[in-house]
Each structure stands twice: as structure tokens, then as C-alpha cells.
Amino acid sequence: MKADVLKLLLQSHAEGDESSFRRAALQLASAESVAGHVRIADEIRAIIAKMPPTSTRKHGAVVDIAVPRGEIADILEGGHRDERLRDIVLRPEVEETLKRLLSENRARARLERFGVAPRRRLLFHGAPGCGKTLAAAVLAGEMGLPLMTVRFDALFSRFLGATAVQLRAIFAEMPRRPGVYLFDEFDSVAKARGDAQDVGEMNRVVTAFLQLVDADQSGSILVAATNHVELLDRAVFRRFDVIVPFDKPTADQIAVLMKMRLSTVGFPDEAAARLSTQAVGWSFADVARACDDAVRTMALDDRDEISERDVVVALDGLKQRNIPAFT
Ligand SMILES: Nc1ncnc2c1ncn2[C@@H]1O[C@H](COP(=O)(O)OP(=O)(O)OP(=O)(O)O)[C@@H](O)[C@H]1O
Ligand SMILES: [Mg+2]
């Protein structure tokens, strides 16, 4: 399977067929994901993201619809995703919610026949590193839609005074380019409203955002993610169909994540269960980082099986690094 993809990769490069090359590279990333090599897959995807946008193909111009162009490209980053539900550890209720949302959005036509629409305006909130961005990528991957991330920081710093105009441009993209639109660090809108020098401008931005959400008739899924849900006011809440919490993991969820990330290097389930209790209070991202550190140690030692000690050392190392979870 991988040999075929590699052949395709070389062939498309030899023929100067950029778009096939990109597709083959994405397939390679998918193959690595499926094989459990999540890191390698991520690295390949990061390289693909850096490739210049596809300009020409042998048979006339081709446009990769996932990559925004022009002025909007600075504030909207897009790409197809390979993440799936199996890549994320969720509370059972949250998993049910996401599955239900996927079913509704897949059955749009049927729902509309009965005069209802799928719920597609979602607010994800919770502690950092607990899966909000990942869940948006999973929705995109499961729906086969690109994940379009709105870069709020760029929106505010680069276009101060014209933020509402830029927001309008993003909403104008939504019907044209179906996708999962992730408004990450969404609280920066609400927060900025409180402490910006130009309160009038921020009020205009929030008002514009709410109006645009109301007016949006596209089939795109809109996800706003925040770790400061308390900063959002009622008017904002009211616009969302579903509010999804992302909490820090329980010991059981930590064990599941450890198994997910370490099963390919021979980490026994019992060890995961044992060690998971040491990381209670950490975020998923912290646990993932410790697992990666342990794999690094194993690889540097020229072993291909991980030991419980590798993981213990990595967990301790992270504890000592004074990461926010422990301060
Ligand atoms: N629920 C989860 N299941 C599996 N892995 C997770 C989960 N949450 C986080 N991770 C791991 O941590 C990484 C970072 O998580 P993510 O970016 O989704 O956090 P976030 O909630 O968006 O945080 P922030 O508020 O800082 O944006 C993910 O790429 C993944 O490797
Ligand atoms: Mg995030």
C-alpha cells in the first residue's frame, strides 16, 4: 500500500503534476495515521501545508478548494483533515453529541424535507489541551470537509478598524466553500470588547459577528472554541445550537490516551492503567507530550519496545518542567 503511494508521489513529481503530488502526500499521511504513526502523519501534513498553493496542472488550471486565496488567505487557513473519532478520547455524552451532530449533518437533505435543519453552530469550551481544536478537526475529517481556521489574532492585529469587514468576507466564503469553520480563541472577541482601547470597534465586531451568524444560511459547520466561556454574554450563547464542554481527563481517559499513543510500541494495558493515576489533573495534551517523550527515549536507546520506566521518567520530567497544570 505504502509502496504504491510512494510510486505515485515520485511519478507525480517527475511529471510536475503538483496536485497529484499533494494528493499522494496526503495519502501517505493517511497511511501513517492508520498505521498508528500519528506523529509522522502530522509532520507530513505540516510539510504539505507549507507547499505553495497548487497553481497549474497539466490539463489546465486547478484550484485546491481547501486553500483560501487572496486577501482572506491571511486570516483563514484551510486544509483537509484525516482525524477521525477513533483519534480522540471523549466523555461518553460528548461522544454521543458529536456522533449525533455528524448524523444530522450527513442527513441534511432528509432533515430539510421535514422542515428542520441539522444543528451546525457549535460552541466548544474547556481547559487548554483538552481537545477542542482536535474535535473540530475530527468533525472535518469525518465529514470529509476541510477545516477552515479563522485566525482571530491576525484578524485583530492586521485589520484593526476593518475587522467587521474581514469577518463578513469569511462568512461570504462559507456557502462558497463548504467546510468546518473554526473560530479559535473565540473569547478574544468578547474579551477585547471589555478591555480594548477602542470599545466602539469591538462592539461593532461582536454585533457584526452575531448578525452574520444569524444570516448564515450555508451548510458549513461553525465551531467557536474558547477556554473562557465565562467571558461570553447571553447574546453570544443564544446563537449556538449546541454547547460542548471539554474537560480535563479522568484517570480512565488518561489510560485510554496512553494506550492509543503507545500501543504500537508494546505498552501493556495494565501499565497504562497503573500509571494513569499519576497524571490526573493534567490535560490530554500534557499526557500526549509525556507519551511522545517516552517514545523518544525508547528510540534513542535503539529499542522498539517501550518500558514502563520510559513512561515513568517522561511523566516525572514533565512534572518537573513546571508546566501550567502544576502551578
Ligand atoms: N480529548 C483528546 N483525545 C486525544 N488527544 C487529545 C485530546 N485532547 C487533546 N489531545 C492531544 O493534545 C493536542 C492538543 O489538543 P487541542 O489542540 O485539541 O487542545 P485545545 O482544547 O484546542 O486547547 P487550546 O484551548 O489550548 O486551544 C491534540 O493535538 C492531541 O494530540
Ligand atoms: Mg485549540
Image: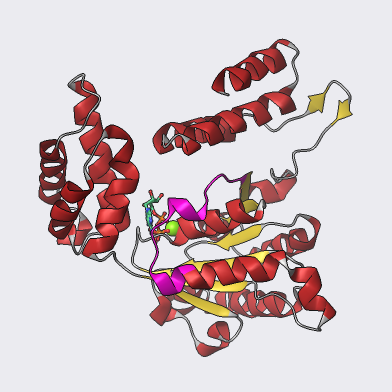
**Which image quadrant is residue 155 in?**
bottom right
Q: Seen in the image, is 307 located left or right of residue 105?
A: left
Q: Percent position (x, y) of residue 23?
A: 67, 31
**Which image quadrant is residue 231 in?**
bottom left
Magenta-colored stretch includes residue 222? no
Magenta-colored stretch includes residue 92? yes
Q: Percent position (x, y) of residue 65?
A: 75, 44
Residue name at image x 75 percent, y 73 percent: 216
Question: Residue placed farthest to the right in the image?
Answer: 60
Residue name at image x 74 percent, y 78 percent: 117
Q: Percent position (x, y) of residue 66?
A: 70, 45
Q: Depth check: 231 or 37 in front? A: 37
Question: Residue placed farthest to the top in the image?
Answer: 14
Q: In this view, does 112 lie above or below 303?
A: below
Q: Seen in the image, is 43 located left or right of residue 100?
A: left
Q: In this view, does 211 lie above or below 14?
A: below
Q: Depth check: 102 or 203 in front? A: 102
Q: Can residue 86 be seen by looking at this rendering?
A: yes
Q: Quadrant of ligand 2?
A: bottom left
Q: Depth check: 15 or 307 in front? A: 307
Q: Percent position (x, y) of residue 287?
A: 25, 51
Q: Can residue 187 be seen by looking at this rendering?
A: no
Which contiguous range is marked in magenta?
80-95
Q: In this view, does 36 lie above or below 150?
A: above
Residue name at image x 16 percent, y 47 percent: 271
Assign the N terminus to one quadrant of the image. top right
Q: Seen in the image, is 124 located left or right of residue 327?
A: right
